[in-house]
Structure formats: structure tokens, C-alpha cells
């Protein structure tokens, strides 16, 4: 017998996490999760209508009003994929982190979504490592193929008609995990129906390819003009060619006897670990309740046009054609795909738009015709007569669509296909499909993208989702009073060689050298780059989000070609700068800013970047100071504050955004794409023990300060009576993850203000400020160190947290697998011939004796549970086959109704989940 090991998550932690959270266990004594090929006799396979794909527990939280209405009134079955369990988030309810926090957050999610009638959550066991705005870093940590394999497998297991997910675009502040979860959903939507994608799932696991009918992302780009019942039809979209649907949250739930907006709010409060328990009630006035908005990305079926008309305003309009029939429409099961080739068309140019129609597998269509409608001034030519289409058959018709000669460029046009077929009693059945077409100029000049935007555009091209392009405003940062090179990429969209010129029309306070640059002999379909030296000539202009339009100084790139001109409208963002001379003597790190210690200009750290406005300077404001002595950088932050937030134990010195704290961020080379190559130090001014505490977070090597920054010195003083505090640090250059560029080191200082005792923050202020700026090194300020030759520091490989809760260590996940037969973790089912299953669970004097039939080597994860509470657990490895017995020690006899759960992780691959009642 091998040596057993107990789970690292304590039984008490399990009990707290699981209380009231576990789904009902299967009542049958022999229920297992088994190979898909055996399911016909073993269980009823999940048959979802809608599947949401997100990154963390709570990502679905602002769509629960919609999901709940669908479930209550239309019996729509919804499931959730959560790629991580949120172990990297904060914890406002206790000291747990890592796997223990993952248990808590999974339990919160199960309680929350249960209010919307959702019972199935599929956790994929990827690590929630920290807040980042970088999808490339997320891919590096999660792994593309592994994550996509799991998502595709769950889709094939649950066979949803509709996929909903998150925004894939690297918009400022959009979490990189959210972006990447959306990417995985988009790719899986395309691949799950392709038997050549992850073929072993089909050939070895017995899964069937499954192609969902519709793909949506939550939210929409545009302006909601107001709340109330009419909000579905009053949204003003950024792109009218998009299909956008609104679902009003003011509808009343009979199940909960309240508006769905309030039910959703009560569900959101379940995410107490994230500080959401303090969310206030929504308005009692239905006219003040808003809509959830959804953007249709793709459809394989006819649909009701999401043009914000009354027909599209119903709460289930976006499900019509996929889950629910369209009144008077083509029968459910009809397929329709409308696609242009090419996607880009110049004014007067043409594209081929195809409409592929598939008859339902159970029914033929007759008298079929397809008509295409285009904008005014456009033309469409083609024969849309199909006639008879046998059951399951597909036919494609093509139309040549030509843009109007004066079509507006850098815009999207809507091309619609209307399908008609003969219905019963001489009626006509109608179906709608459409596509966007991008109208482009002859030659377009685009400001160079940021690295994460370039990565996104490469993904868009590789994945063939051109409809996602153009939503991220092109921005580049520029040091206040400084210069940079700005490259403009010219693309020739025409079919002839072009020559012309490019002009930068900059706002006051900026100049370009040259102002206009020529280009010549740009071949059809090719690109070239023209470079400009751009300078901020007026250093008095406001920086960060205090300047320009929300921090952006918009300008225009004008490109001429073939007697035409086109414009694009990017922006420059000014970041603050400072120069730090070597100090006459090194500051003393004592938590005091003494006269003469910091000779440079003080830094204004009172700019708001997130949260509530400071009511006054006394409520929250701050001043920063920088100095250098030798190869050491000194930073002092003087914070004015009228209320001290939660004072944490020294053992809870982490997740600093929960209370009053300071974060100091350094990007040595000043060119990091994400914070994994930066140094970010946080400090709390005091703890319950009375001392300062500090550490590193969301950077090259996060963790306790003594371990991750051993040569750093930190001190603090707190005023008495309380009116604020000072954090002072010494950071040796050798402690940074790379060599400092003395002409361009990235730097920022953030102040987190909390006036509560519930571990929730209210206000965030700092030096260089935008939403999500803590994850955006390119938006940090710039520090120059004249006369300094920094030490040569080798680049450090990022240390990314990997402490993740595995599904085999989550009894709530195992219970779900037992109930619905879908294997845990998004992985495959183990072969019964090489796995293990529970045979019996018998109560003894001081333990529960568990008998397991082992058919192959692996690891058993065993739990004793009762009504969502874990009473005991163990993990044991088995290398030999046969009947084996293990004991779960108990302090007292477990109550009636107790069960034993087993997740067996087979060495040969895959898992098996089983349950037995305690006898």
C-alpha cells in the first residue's frame, strides 16, 4: 500500500467553501462518469442550449439577468465554462489564497449562477496568475492547444446551440484573461464541428463533432440612451451593421418574486470574496433598470436581424433560429451562412458574397430563392434561384456586390440575404442572414499598433474574424516634452500600383518631422512604412487621463493616392516625465521625507485612475519623491487620508488593493509589453502587529518582500491622530528584472484608498493614470537619470504563479461529473479498463471504510460529504490492481445522507468520478 497524503486544503476550508454550494449528488448507488461511447445506457447526456465561456468565477455575473429569464420563461438550459477558479483574485472574506481560494470562488459561482437556473459549471483547471492586460502572456501561461482542446471537448460533450463569451479586443483595461477566454470561444466555435480538429476526441473518446449555431460576445460598442422597457430599441451602436440585442432586466421573476435586475444583484453578492457583498440594491423603479446587451459575432442559421427594432427587442430574439423557431420563419434546423470574399472593398470595387443554405436534416425545402439587399448606391448581381433542396442538402449561390463610387471609406456596409421557401397552405417561410463588408480607401495610412494590438490583429487574420477589427483606437504614448518615432503603415487596397504622400495633422503643442512624406511605386496589395519624428512642443499640456479627450490627443493621418485622399484618426497619449540627479547623500529609509533628501520636483500622485473621486485632498491625495544614490533608487510617497482602511495581519500581507496601500512600479528598459518583465512593489503602511509590510505583485516574481526582493528596504510612518502615512523605499538596481535604461526607465506610483473595514477599496490615484494602467507599462511615466551608468543586470525569466486547484480536489466538481457524466477539468474520461471506481462506503467506529475497485494505476481523491460540506478527505496513489480499502477518519458518526465521492486520475489518461452512499 502506498503512503497516503492529505489534501493541502483543510477540511475546514472545504466546509467553508462548499457550504450550500454543491449540486445535488446522484442518488443511484452505481452512477459513474464513463466513456462517451457507453453513455446511452449509463446516463442522460447534457444537452445545453447556451454555453458561456469566461476566464474567472464572476465573469458571467452581469449576464445572469438574461440567463435567468431564458431559463425561467423558456426552459433554456445554460452552462458555464470557467477556465480558471480565480485563485489570483483578492479575498475579502478570509486569508485563503491559492487552491483554498479557488474552492471558495467556485462555491460562490455555483450559488450565484444557481439563481439563474444554471447547474453546470465546467472548470478547466488553468491558473489565474494575476491581473494582466496581455493576451500573449495569458497564452504563454495557459497554453493555446491545451486550453482550446478542453473548450472544444466541453462543447462536444454538451452540444450547445449558442456560445456566449467575452470581448476579445485589447481595449484599454480589458483583462488579458478575458480577451483570451473570448479567443478560445471564437476558435472553438469554428473547430468543434470539424472532425479533423482534436481528432482523438472523436476517434478515441467517442465524442461527436458539434458545430454551434450562433456566437455572441457580452456587451456592445455604442451608447445606451437610457434604461427602462424600451432600452432594447434605444441603443446607438458604433457600427449600425452589427447585430446587437438587448434584454431588459426589469422583467419580473415569478420564481423569485422580484425583478431580474434585483435577482442578478443578489446573485452578484454571492461573490463575497471579491468584495461584491456590499453591492447595493438596484432601483425599485422598473423604468430605471437597464438592458443587458449582446453582440452577434457569427451565425450559421437564419436569424432575426438585431437592428434594435421591435422584432429584435424580445428577450429571446437572439436565440431565434438556433434554439427557438422564428415565427413565420424557415424551420428550426435550417442552416444559412452569408460571407464576403474579399472582406475589404474600395469605393466602386466589388466583392463576391456567397449565401450557403442547408435544409434541415428532417425536412426538404422547396421553392427556395435568395435575394440580396445592399446599401443605396450599391448593386448586387446574381441568380438566387435554388428551387428544391433535399433534407440535409446544401446549396450555395453567389452575388457580385459592387460598392457605390462615393461609398464612405473606413466604414462598414451591411449586405443582407433574404431566403424564401414554400410553406404549408401556400404560405412563404422567410429567413434572414447578413454580413458586414469593409469599405477601404485606395491607400490607407495606419499608425503603428501597440504590441498587444498587433498580436490581436495577427490573431484576427489567422482566425478569419475580420469583423472584430477596428474597434481598438490606435494610440501611442509620448513623454511630456519629448519625442518619438511614429511609423505609419501604408496599405494599397487597390489593384494598381500607387504613389502619393502622407501628412500628419497634429494638434497644437505637437510637431512632426517631416510634416508630409512621399511614397511611390506601392504595388497592389502591398504595404510600406513611412516614419515621422513626433515631438510634444508644449510640455505644459496635461498628461495622462487629465489631458486631451480622456487622455488622448487626437490627430489625423491624411494619405493621398490616385487623386483621392483618406483619413485615419489615431491619438497620442502624453505620459509624465521627471529627471533624477544623483543625490548628495543617500536618503535614510525611515518613513520620513526629511529636508534635502529628495531634491527633485515632487510628483503629483493625486490623479484619479479608477474608482470614486476623492471628496477632498484630505480624503485622499498624495505626493511622490524620487532620488538616486549610487546604484540605488529611492522612492517616497506621502499620502494624505482621513480614514484608515482595514488593518490586515502581517500574515495577510497580499492583495494590497483591498485596503490602504502604495504600489511602486518600475520598468527597467521602459519597453515592456506586460508586467511580467517589470518590478512592482506594494507596501501597506501598518498591520495588526504595527509594522509596515510589503511584497511584489503581478510582476516578474510576485510574493512576500523578504523572499522576492531581499535587498529592498521599506519603512513607513502613520500619523497620530490619523491623517495619512508615508511609505519610503530603497530599491537597488540589481534587484530589478533587467538593466535600467537611464534615458527611458518606466515608472509609476499608485495609491489605493479604502475607507471601509470590509476589505474593499474605493479610490485609486497615481502619477500616470488610465483605467487598468497597473497592467499597462507603456502608459507609465518616464524617468531620466542623467550621468548614471546603471549596472548590467541579466534579464530575469518571469516566475508565474502556478498553484492551481485541480478539479480532482474539488468535491463540488466531482459531484457534478457524477451527476451529468461529463469528465472533470475539461479532460477526457478514463478508460474503465484502466481506471478505478467506488464499490462501497461503510461506517466504522471512528472512520468510513471505502472500498475501491482499481483496474489501473493512478491517484484517488476521496471525499466524505454531506449537504455540501466536506467532512473528511484524502488522496492516495495506487500502483496495483484489485480491491483496495482506505479509511476516512471521522471524529463522530457522519449524519444520514452522507456520501463518499471519488475522482480517480488514471495514469493512462483521463478521470473517472463515482459516488456511494455511506452504509
Image (cartoon, grey):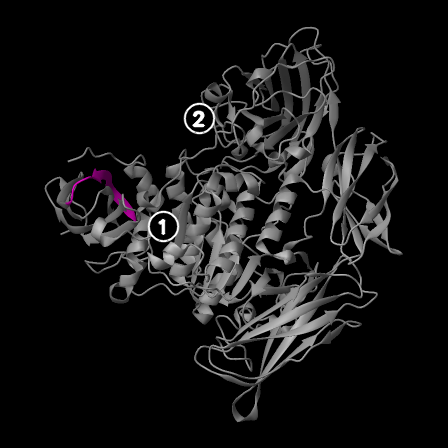
Q: Position of residue 318 (x, y in %)?
A: 56, 68
Image: magenta residue range? 868-881
Q: Nearer the viewer, residue 718 or 43?
A: 43
On screen, residue 673 above or below 830: above
Please report the residue visible at 19 percent of the width from the left and 58 percent of the height from the top. Answer: 29
Q: Earlier in the sequence, mark 1 or mark 2?
A: 2
Please report the residue visible at 62 percent of the width from the left and 47 percent of the height from the top. Answer: 458
On screen, residue 29 above or below 213: above
Can you identify the residue that label 2 sits on? 649
* Magenta highlight: main SS: strand
Q: Position of residue 571 (x, y in %)?
A: 77, 43
Dot 1: element: loop
Find the residue positioned furthest to the bottom: 425
Please report the residue visible at 62 percent of the width from the left and 30 percent of the height from the top. Answer: 750
**Residue 827 badge:** 1
Q: Position of residue 400 (x, y in %)?
A: 71, 72
Amino acid at each position: 500500500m502506498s503512503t497516503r497524503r492529505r489534501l493541502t486544503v483543510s477540511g475546514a476550508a472545504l466546509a467553508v467553501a462548499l457550504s450550500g454550494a454543491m449540486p445535488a449528488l446522484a442518488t443511484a448507488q452505481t452512477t459513474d462518469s464513463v466513456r462517451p461511447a457507453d453513455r446511452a445506457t449509463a446516463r442522460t447526456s447534457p444537452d445545453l442550449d447556451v454555453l458561456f465561456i469566461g476566464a474567472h468565477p464572476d465573469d458571467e455575473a452581469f449576464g445572469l439577468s438574461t440567463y435567468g429569464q431564458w431559463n425561467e420563461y423558456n426552459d433554456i438550459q445554460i452552462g458555464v465554462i470557467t477556465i480558471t477558479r480565480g485563485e489570483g483574485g483578492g479575498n475579502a472574506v478570509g486569508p485563503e489564497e491559492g487552491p483554498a481560494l479557488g474552492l471558495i470562488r467556485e462555491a460562490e459561482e455555483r450559488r450565484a449562477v444557481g439563481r439563474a437556473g444554471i447547474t453546470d459549471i465546467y472548470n478547466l483547471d488553468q491558473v489565474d496568475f494575476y491581473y494582466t492586460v496581455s493576451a500573449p502572456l495569458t497564452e504563454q501561461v495557459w497554453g493555446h492547444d491545451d486550453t482550446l482542446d478542453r473548450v472544444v471537448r466541453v462543447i462536444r460533450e454538451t452540444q450547445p446551440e449558442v456560445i456566449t463569451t467575452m470581448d476579445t479586443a485589447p481595449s484599454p483595461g480589458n483583462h488579458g484573461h478575458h480577451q483570451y477566454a473570448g479567443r478560445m470561444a471564437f476558435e472553438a466555435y469554428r473547430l468543434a464541428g470539424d472532425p479533423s480538429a482534436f481528432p482523438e476526441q472523436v476517434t478515441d473518446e467517442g465524442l461527436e463533432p458539434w458545430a454551434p449555431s450562433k456566437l455572441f460576445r457580452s456587451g456592445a460598442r455604442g451608447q445606451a440612451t437610457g434604461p427602462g422597457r424600451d432600452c432594447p430599441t434605444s441603443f446607438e451602436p458604433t457600427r449600425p451593421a452589427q447585430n446587437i440585442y438587448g434584454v431588459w432586466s426589469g422583467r419580473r421573476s415569478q420564481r423569485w418574486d422580484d425583478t431580474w435586475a434585483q435577482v442578478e444583484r443578489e446573485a452578484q453578492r454571492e461573490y463575497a470574496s471579491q468584495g461584491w457583498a456590499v453591492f447595493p440594491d438596484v432601483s425599485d423603479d422598473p423604468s430605471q433598470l437597464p438592458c443587458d446587451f449582446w453582440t452577434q459575432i457569427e451565425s450559421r442559421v437564419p436569424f432575426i436581424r438585431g437592428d434594435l427594432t421591435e422584432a429584435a427587442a424580445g428577450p429571446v430574439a437572439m436565440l431565434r433560429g438556433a434554439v427557438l423557431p422564428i415565427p413565420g420563419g424557415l424551420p428550426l434546423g435550417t442552416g444559412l451562412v452569408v460571407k464576403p470574399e474579399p472582406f475589404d472593398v474600395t469605393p466602386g470595387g466589388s466583392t463576391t458574397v456567397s449565401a450557403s443554405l442547408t435544409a434541415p436534416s428532417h425536412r426538404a425545402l422547396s421553392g427556395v430563392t435568395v435575394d440580396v439587399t445592399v446599401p443605396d448606391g450599391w448593386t448586387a448581381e446574381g441568380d438566387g434561384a435554388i428551387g428544391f433542396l433535399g433534407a440535409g442538402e446544401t446549396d450555395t449561390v453567389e452575388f457580385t456586390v459592387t460598392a457605390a463610387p462615393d461609398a464612405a471609406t473606413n466604414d462598414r456596409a451591411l449586405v443582407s440575404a433574404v431566403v424564401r421557401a414554400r410553406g404549408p397552405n401556400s404560405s412563404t417561410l422567410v429567413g434572414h442572414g447578413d454580413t458586414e463588408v469593409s469599405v477601404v480607401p485606395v491607400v490607407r495610412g495606419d499608425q503603428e499598433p501597440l504590441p498587444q494590438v498587433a498580436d490581436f490583429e495577427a490573431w484576427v487574420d489567422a482566425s478569419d474574424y475580420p469583423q472584430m477589427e477596428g474597434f481598438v483606437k490606435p494610440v501611442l504614448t509620448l513623454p511630456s516634452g519629448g519625442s518619438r518615432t511614429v511609423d505609419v503603415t501604408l496599405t494599397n487596397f487597390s489593384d494598381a500600383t500607387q504613389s502619393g504622400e502622407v501628412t500628419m495633422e497634429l494638434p497644437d503643442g505637437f510637431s512632426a518631422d517631416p510634416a508630409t512624406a512621399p511614397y511611390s511605386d506601392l504595388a497592389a496589395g502591398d504595404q510600406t512604412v513611412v516614419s515621422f519624428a513626433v515631438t510634444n512642443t508644449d510640455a505644459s499640456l496635461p498628461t495622462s487621463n487629465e489631458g486631451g479627450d480622456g487622455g488622448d490627443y487626437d490627430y489625423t493621418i491624411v494619405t493621398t493616392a490616385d487623386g483621392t485622399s483618406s483619413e485615419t484618426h489615431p491619438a497620442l497619449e502624453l505620459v509624465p516625465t521627471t529627471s533624477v540627479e544623483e543625490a548628495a547623500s543617500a536618503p535614510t529609509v525611515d518613513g520620513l521625507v526629511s529636508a534635502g533628501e529628495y531634491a527633485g520636483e515632487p510628483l503629483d500622485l493625486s490623479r484619479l485612475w479608477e474608482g470614486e473621486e476623492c471628496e477632498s485632498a484630505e480624503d485622499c491625495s498624495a505626493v511622490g519623491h524620487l532620488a538616486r544614490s549610487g546604484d540605488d533608487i529611492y522612492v517616497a510617497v506621502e499620502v494624505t487620508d482621513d480614514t484608515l482602511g482595514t488593518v490586515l495581519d502581517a500574515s495577510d500581507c497580499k492583495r494590497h488593493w483591498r485596503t490602504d496601500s502604495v504600489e511602486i512600479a518600475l520598468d527597467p528598459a521602459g519597453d515592456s509589453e506586460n508586467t511580467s518583465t517589470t518590478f512592482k512593489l506594494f507596501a501597506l503602511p501598518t498591520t495588526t502587529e504595527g509594522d509596515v509590510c510589503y511584497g511584489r505583485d503581478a510582476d516578474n516574481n510576485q510574493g512576500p518582500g523578504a523572499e522576492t526582493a531581499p535587498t529592498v528596504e521599506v519603512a513607513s510612518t502613520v500619523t497620530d491622530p490619523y491623517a495619512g502615512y508615508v511609505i519610503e523605499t530603497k530599491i537597488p538596481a540589481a534587484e530589478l528584472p533587467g538593466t535600467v535604461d537611464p534615458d527611458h526607465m518606466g515608472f509609476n506610483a499608485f495609491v489605493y484608498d479604502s475607507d471601509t473595514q470590509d476589505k474593499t477599496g474605493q479610490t485609486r490615484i497615481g502619477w500616470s493614470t488610465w483605467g487598468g494602467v497597473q497592467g499597462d507599462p507603456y502608459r507609465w511615466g518616464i524617468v531620466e537619470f542623467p550621468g548614471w551608468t546603471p549596472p548590467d543586470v541579466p534579464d530575469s525569466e518571469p516566475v508565474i504563479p502556478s498553484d492551481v486547484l485541480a478539479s480532482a480536489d474539488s468535491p463540488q466538481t466531482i459531484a457534478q461529473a457524477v451527476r451529468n457524466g461529463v469528465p472533470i477539468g475539461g479532460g477526457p474520461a478514463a478508460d474503465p479498463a484502466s481506471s478505478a471506481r467506488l464499490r462501497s462506503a461503510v461506517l466504522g467506529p471512528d472512520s468510513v471504510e471505502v472500498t475501491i475497485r482499481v483496474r489501473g494505476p493512478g491517484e484517488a481523491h476521496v471525499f466524505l460529504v454531506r449537504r455540501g460540506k466536506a467532512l473528511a478527505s484524502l488522496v492516495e496513489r495506487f500502483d496495483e490492481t484489485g480491491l483496495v480499502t482506505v479509511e476516512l477518519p471521522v471524529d463522530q458518526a457522519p449524519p444520514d445522507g452522507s456520501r463518499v465521492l471519488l475522482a480517480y486520475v488514471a495514469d493512462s489518461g483521463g478521470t473517472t468520478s463515482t459516488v456511494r452512499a455511506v452504509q
